[in-house]
Image (cartoon, rainbow, N blue to C red):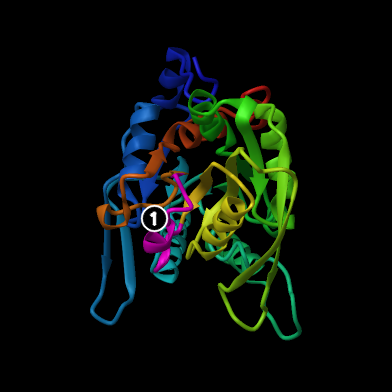
Amino acid sequence: MNVLTERSEDALSGIKMTGQKRLVLVSGRAHPQLAIDIAAELGSDIVPTDARTFANGELYARFDESVRGCDAFVIQSHTAPINEWLMEQLIMVDALKRASAKRITVVAPFYPYARQDKKGRGREPISARLVADLFKVAGADRIMSIDLHAAQIQGFFDGPVDHLFAMPVLLEYFREQLDPATLTMVSPDIGRVRVADIWSDKLGAPLAIIHKRRDPLVPNEVSVHEIVGDVDGRVCLLVDDLIDTGRTIVKAAEALRKNGAISVVVAATHAVFSDPAVELLQSDAIDQVVVTDTLPIPESKRWDRLTILPIAPVLARAIREVFEDGSVTSMFDGAA
């Protein structure tokens, strides 16, 4: 049985305890299906919540049952409109704190503002740090997230941060779909080399790197320059943490094709899919796109070459470990 989905009856009975410890799941409105899937994995329920948006755009949230003394997990996916869902999660954390929850964990599969993790030029904000501060002031004791865009974000929060990984889920899929003998792992830029190198080791495939240069004055515009590594006659697996507009990935795929790749498959944890991503990703240069459901993907943003893998088992297992004061790190020891 996969280490990420393994569940024991003892663990589940502990989660259902209403004596000394009580686990409470609450969910924002951004991605309710993910919360439902997590609850199903845990054999638990989601606390009914009165969440609404007033005519002037202000948000409101109230829980329909007592949360006093509980171990609460606030699940919210930060999709567009990201500021609205961030504010809703902050309000829910504040409500839990004021209702005397014992411990509050923010479950943010896709950490908001993660790409603003440092100052690239003068007079810029470090918004990822600001978000961490907002969670702390609202009353969060802990943050749980998947594949942070920059690992240093873990140090922005004054408290435990559970940095989870989607790699075992994705690797399990690709081990069944791709032949290592013809496979080459590809990093879409220098910044993702470390992750691609780990994938390379896990799949027993050589590594290639795409060198690109981004124009700092033109957002979302990328120029691909050269490929380091042999991709001629190979099946190339491009791996990244997220896909936003898709321009970076498509240009990378086109460059691989021009250099002789016979097939290009794209893997990413977070399917942001801002316009015109869906249109661009249906390029003839890409044979398949594989993502997880950390963010909601409506039917209008799905196509026949898109594969969506469930992430709820990973989050549910991490929630169980935190609730039982276990080891989140142990989830990934030898898992891939």
Q: Mark 1: which secondary structure?
A: loop
Asked if residue 40 lies left or right of residue 312, the reply is: left
Where 277 sits versus 64, above or below? below
Any magenta on residue 280? Answer: yes
- Please state if 302 lies on the left or on the right of 12 as rendered: left
Residue for point 41% across, 58% down: 92
Q: Quadrant of residue 214?
A: bottom right
Please tell me which residue is depicted at 46% across the width and 14% down the height of the picture: 10
* Image location of residue 97, percent across then percent down: 48, 55
Q: Residues within 10 Å of mark 1 (few under 14, many from 20)?
A: some
x and y, in percent, of residue 27 in the image: 36, 49
Q: Nearer the viewer, residue 215 or 86?
A: 215
Q: Quadrant of the rendered structure where residue 202 is?
A: top right
From the viewer's side, name the closer residue of 246 and 120: 246
Q: Position of residue 195 (x, y in %)?
A: 69, 44
Task: Kindly identify the amino acid type of the residue bearing the numbered disc 1.
Answer: Gln
Residue at the image point whose x is 47% and y is 23% from the top: 5
| 325, above or below 106, in the image | above
Q: Is residue 103 visible?
A: no
Q: Which residues are magenta?
A: 272-289
Q: Is residue 248 visible?
A: yes
Viewer-nearest residue: 140 or 310: 310
Above or below, 125 against 327 in this view is: below
Q: Position of residue 185 (x, y in %)?
A: 65, 40
In front of the other: 219 or 295: 219
Query: Mark 1 sits on what residue?
Result: 282
Give residue 251's quadrant in the image: bottom right
329 to the left or right of 104 = right
Q: Residue at x 59, y 41 (%)?
A: 236
